[in-house]
Amino acid sequence: MSNQVSKKVRHILSVSGGKDSSALAIYMSNRQYWRERLGKIANTPIQNVDMEYVFCDTKEELKETYEYLYKLEAYLRKKIERLSIADGEGFQYWLQVHGNYLPSPRMRWCTIQLKIKPFERYVGSDLVYSYIGIRADEDRDGYISKKENIIPLYPFKEDGIDRDDVIRILEESSVGMPDYYKWRTRSGCYFCFFQRKSEWIGLLENHPELYEKAKSFEKLGDETGSKFTWTEGESLEDLAHPSRIAEIKANHEKAMSREKRAKPNRPLVEVLAEVLDAENDDTACNICHI
Ligand code: SF4
């Protein structure tokens, strides 16, 4: 493929189905208004851009994510383009290509195949400003393409928008939080290996059929004796044992109560995010979890 950059300039905001990228879409739809509303000092002048909204659909998403995208589209009054993986090249195809090795934080082939490639195909050789919803209070970078025609921009960092602001944007726009926030704080595939133990229990209780599907991808004690499990050192079968569920839930409840007492009067979503981060602070995926 040619590395030549075409003259067409586009502005693309990729929503993940998570709270931050969704809040950014709302924010960018009327940046001047939201800056004033949140009392933020602007570092850069306002530009009116014709934004394209996209969602890279892994076909392994929660139904709550699709429902949330419809809500967001209704607010934006604009379609969010669903970027699909090529026919026959879904998760199971790539799992076979990778010798049944499940993806993991160290081997994130899923992000490359299911998220990055469809996005780069959509962009082609146009010059693209890619708007990323990393917040001012986060110490991480979002998707940074190696393609010279994709330029990342971080409006929340520029404008000093933090987690509290994001929650306000979502509440005041009436879009609210994604429904899966009752039990899980990260967007992305239902089987995502970045899930914390209590989130797996949330999947089991809210979508038992998806839990079973995730379980079916694990390989335990095959002829080589190797184990491929989603969470390190514990299979989903073991995790679903009643005594283990009770233990995980009790620990989670204790941590929630501790966190609520430590800093009272915070929205529950904030408490949940703190607790889950403390449970496992593996850096979230900088493409899927924004
Ligand atoms: S959500 Fe998780 S499993 Fe899905 S593509 Fe992203 S990192 Fe991989």
Image (cartoon, helix red, strand yellow):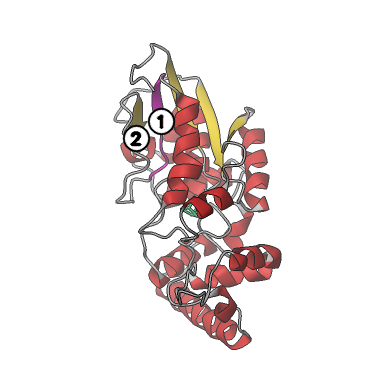
- Residue type beneath disc 1: Ser
> Residue 231 colored magenta?
no
Q: Mark 1 points at which residue?
A: 130
Please give the range of residues in magenta.
126-134
Indicate the secondary structure of the residue bearing disc 2.
loop
In the displayed structure image, the side of residue 182 where residue 126 appears, left or right: left
**Residues packed near mark 2 inside 10 Å, few (<14), some (14 to 19) or many (20 plus):** few
Q: Which of 65 and 48 is in front in this view?
A: 65
- Side of 202 where 94 appears, left or right: left
Q: What residue type is labelled 2?
A: Ser
Left or right, 124 with reference to 158: right
Say if residue 33 shows up in the picture: no
Disc 2 versus disc 1: distance between alpha carbons? Answer: 10 Å
What residue did someone put label 2 on?
Answer: 145
Dividing the picture into quadrants, the one containing residue 204 is bottom right
Contact? badges 2 and 1 (CB < 8 Å): yes
Taking the image as shown, residue 174 lies to the left or right of residue 154, namely: right
